[in-house]
Amino acid sequence: MFASFETRAAAVSAEVHRFAGKPDALAFILALLEKEGVSPAEGAHAVWAPGTFLDGFDRERIAADAGVRFQVTRELAASAKVGLSQAALGIADTGTLVTIATAVVERLVSALPPIHVAILPTSAIVADLAAALRRVSPKEHAYLSLITGPSRTADIERVLTIGVHGPGRLIIVCVDDLKGSLSVE
């Protein structure tokens, strides 16, 4: 199912990377942040929404060394170079991410910075929207976001523009040994 997800996500201009374990995925993310100029300097930060991916890693060191802010505010997200979040599910037939965005910080980090890095358990990729909706309950998840590629819009003359109403770049980091609350077992 990963191959189909990767193909469909790439077709809508998302970048997909797969890693066997969390350490390799974190090394990739930290290198990406450095390449994008993220640092502890004022105005050069990234914002990272809560999630299980960083369990077992030193968040304080990541914050100090890489310029990542874990206390997310609207102002910090709006001025961040990169926003990082953990997706709940991936939909193979469209390359879509499903995020549980009940907490406002989830929406801030995925919508305001120009680059969104979404971390996805590889085991959480399902076949289609129907399969995804069978895994979520409106009683438990009051706000879901479906993200298919970077933000795009077109005017009446069909001139496509990327990144006007959200991130102009979507990077999906699939991690084989990461379990999510909605993972397919």
Image (cartoon, helix red, strand yellow):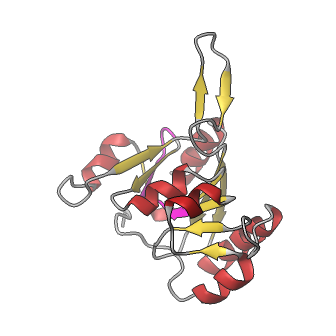
Look at the image and say whether residue 172 sits in the magenta stretch: no
* Residue 138 in picture, x, y percent from top left: 21, 52
Say which of 54 and 63 sits in front: 63
- Residue for point 51% across, 68% down: 72
Which residue corresponds to the image point at 46% horizontal and 72% vertical from the top-left? 50
Image quarter for residue 154?
Answer: top right
**Residue 32 lies in quadrant:** bottom right
The C terminus: image quadrant: bottom left
Whether residue 144 is visible, yes or no, is yes
Q: Nearer the viewer, residue 168 or 13?
A: 168
Residue 85's place in the image compared with 51, above or below, is: above
For this orientation, the residue located farthest to the top is 157
Tell me the residue at 58%/11% (across/down). Answer: 156
Q: Is residue 120 visible?
A: no
Percent coordinates x, y for residue 161 in the rendering? 67, 28
Q: Which residues are magenta?
A: 84-94
Left or right: 49 with respect to 26? left
Percent x, y of residue 47: 59, 67
Which residue sits at x=69%, y=58%? 81
